[in-house]
Image (cartoon, grey):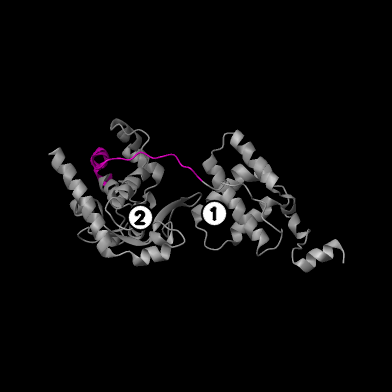
Amino acid sequence: MNGVEAVIVAGDWTDPDRAKITLAEYAERWIVERPGLRPRTVELYRWLLRKHITPYIGDVPLNRLSAATFRQWRADRLAAGVSASVLAKCYRLLRGVLNTAVDPDELIAKNPCKIPGAEKETPEERPLVTVGQVFEIAAALPERFSAMVLLAAFGSLRFGEVTALRRCDVAEDASQVRVVRQFVEVPRQGVVAGPPKSRAGVRTVTLPQAIRPDIVKHLAEFVGPDPEALLFTGEKSGGAIRRPNFNQRTRWTEAVTKLGLEGLHFHDLRHAGNVWASKAGMSTRDLMARMGHDDMRAALIYQRATSEADQHIADRLSKLVEEHRKGSA
């Protein structure tokens, strides 16, 4: 028995001709054939390929890729000033693509992506605003966007989730909001409604009693009677709010800078709400369900969270607001 026959018998043989497809070609095919990818995810993957992968190693055939290929590629991109966070996204994409090339496609015998720790991101620590600062931000923005700030902070809602809310998603007394979709911005398509970021993103959030009158007031003054009417729209367009337009219309950067919060992002409001909620003494499962976080146990987290726990979190947040208001009186 010769060497090739021995490999075939051992089950480790792959057809070298099939593996001559380049990394760029195979990665594009992988994206097209990948079921369930959200439009924004597809755009991110293609951007990573176009910007950071294809120009450097995209023309290398799969059967010529090695661990050294990826170590050198990563080192070169780091030296060129690309952040470790972006390269971590690239690495996870490459590892996923080549996992499929191994199994089930059987184009290569093993995955050459073997850089310990390359998949990990270490994002910079974000600023933590206080309850009082949240209300200062809300007051500094045009009134039609004030409730948006409160919902993001005290409801732990993402930008895409809060901008996609409709009248039918909010209880009449503003005791709860139902998150069943989000807006994402897709190049060449504009703002598109889709499912939340994760399975656990579909949730009902109990709002603190202390901010419910603010939400009810917003509904009365700025939201049409149609159940499908968006909670937040442009004053003239009446359409969905794009993130760049929001920053421009609200003069967000100018507003937060005047408050001494230079560099604060809208998403930092949700971050603050998550921190406050974590101090309410509830279990990790309950907190994950409220925040809409997902992992391998997402279904269990969502199913086992109780409305009583969510109410407890809302009551705790309401108490924080009331303490702030008493202190400001």
Which image quadrant: the C terminus? top left
The part of the chain drawn in magenta is 121-145
Classify mark 2: residues with Cα within 10 Å, few (<14), some (14-19) or many (20+): many
Which image quadrant: the N terminus? bottom right
Magenta-span inclusion, residue 127: yes
Residue 273 location (% of width, % of height): 30, 48
Q: What residue sits 61% from the left and 47% below the top?
A: 49
- Nearest the viewer among 257 and 7 is 7
For this orientation, the residue located farthest to the bottom is: 9
Magenta-span inclusion, residue 194: no
**Residue 232 visible in the shown view:** no
- The quadrant in which residue 253 appears is top left
- Which is in the foreground here, disc 1 or disc 2? 2
- Nearest the viewer among 5 and 18 is 5
Mark drawn on residue 291: 2
Q: What residue sits 74% from the left and 67% below the top?
A: 11
State whether residue 7 is above or below residue 263. Answer: below
The amino acid type of the residue labelled 1 equals Val
Residue 146 location (% of width, % of height): 26, 45
Residue 15 location (% of width, % of height): 77, 62
Provide the residue designation for mark 1.
42
State whether residue 230 is above or below residue 50. Answer: below
Mark drawn on residue 300: none
In the shown orientation, is residue 294 left or right of residue 67? left
Label 1 and label 2: CA atoms lie apart by: 24 Å
For this orientation, the residue located farthest to the right is: 1
**Residue 292 visible in the shown view:** yes
Element assignment for label 2 = helix
Q: How many marks?
A: 2
In the shown orientation, is residue 216 left or right of residue 11? left
